[in-house]
Amino acid sequence: MARGCMVVKKAVLAEALTGQFEDHHAFLCRTLLDSIDFLSGQIDALTERTTQAVEQLPCPDPSGGSRPDAGADLVAKLVTIPGVGVRTAQILLAELGPDMTVFPTADHLVSWAKFAPRTVQSGGKNTSGPTGKGNPWIKGAIGEAALSASRSNTFLGARYKRIVKRRGRKRALVAVGHSLLVAVWHLLNEPDTPYTDLGSDYHQHLVDPTRRTRDLVRQLKALGHDATLASAA
């Protein structure tokens, strides 16, 4: 009964434990709760210290200098990307830094973070290979953000749904992570540029309507249906 959702089972659990919950059980529960409270306090202290350190990051200024204590502005910009939360934004700033001049282009950043496709040549054949290890903290943060973005009704969510049908879940998440890093590079490299979502229907506008209609009719015929189209009034 303690497994799953316990909110609706409190009364039943209390009744089941009546007469069987002794002082020794209470001592063990109190010990576990004290450990949780101690660890929660440490997490809160570290979180506050991390937030202060990120907010004090000197950010490059378009005039050539730097703006002190502008890290909070960068965090606010990064969280506008679907799937990126405050903690993910802080990890990215801590690992990448606010100055994107070390990466001449977004492709350099993606390649350095090991989110770019890699070709393996052997015996005159070209095959796709693993992306590589890269920075474990960035990979974990981007992977979590990509998973969250894949469930959203945004351009990144639509990108995941398009790729997962052909390439599988892992490669689709890497592709979304690739797009996330490209967006991060542009937001950090161009301070005055806001994030703009292209929309979940972005790819549909790129497809020729006649070709899409022909493909859908062919799919219906392959399923054994006799499709007859009539022009809309």
Image (tube, rainbow, N blue to C red):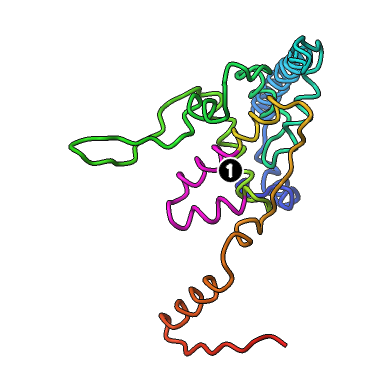
Residue plotted at (40% across, 28% down) = 132
Q: Is the magenta stretch mostly helix, strand or loop?
A: helix
Q: Where is residue 63 in the image (x, y as percent from the top left)?
A: 79, 14
Magenta-drawn stretch contains 173: yes
Magenta-drawn stretch contains 74: no
- 31 sits to left or right of 107: right
Q: In this view, does 226 lie above or below 130?
A: below
- Quarter residue 183 falls in: top right
Label 1: how many Cα within 10 Å (few below 14, some 14–19, many 20+): some
Q: Position of residue 216 (x, y in %)?
A: 51, 75
Q: In this view, does 224 lie above or below 26?
A: below
Image quarter where the C terminus lies is bottom right
Residue plotted at (71% across, 18% down) = 38
Which kind of residue does numbered mark 1 sit on?
A: Leu
Q: How many labels does the image show?
A: 1
Q: Where is residue 214 in the image (x, y as percent from the top left)?
A: 50, 76
The answer to which of 11 and 112 lies nearer the viewer is: 112
Q: Which stretch is magenta?
A: 157-179
Q: Is residue 28 above or below residue 15?
A: above
Residue plotted at (71% across, 21% down) = 34
Q: Is mark 1 on a helix, strand or loop?
A: helix
Q: Where is residue 160 in the image (x, y as percent from the top left)?
A: 55, 50
- Quarter residue 25 falls in: top right
The answer to which of 45 and 16 lies nearer the viewer is: 45
Residue ID for mark 1: 147
Residue plotted at (49% across, 53% down) = 164
- In this view, the residue farthest toward the left is 123
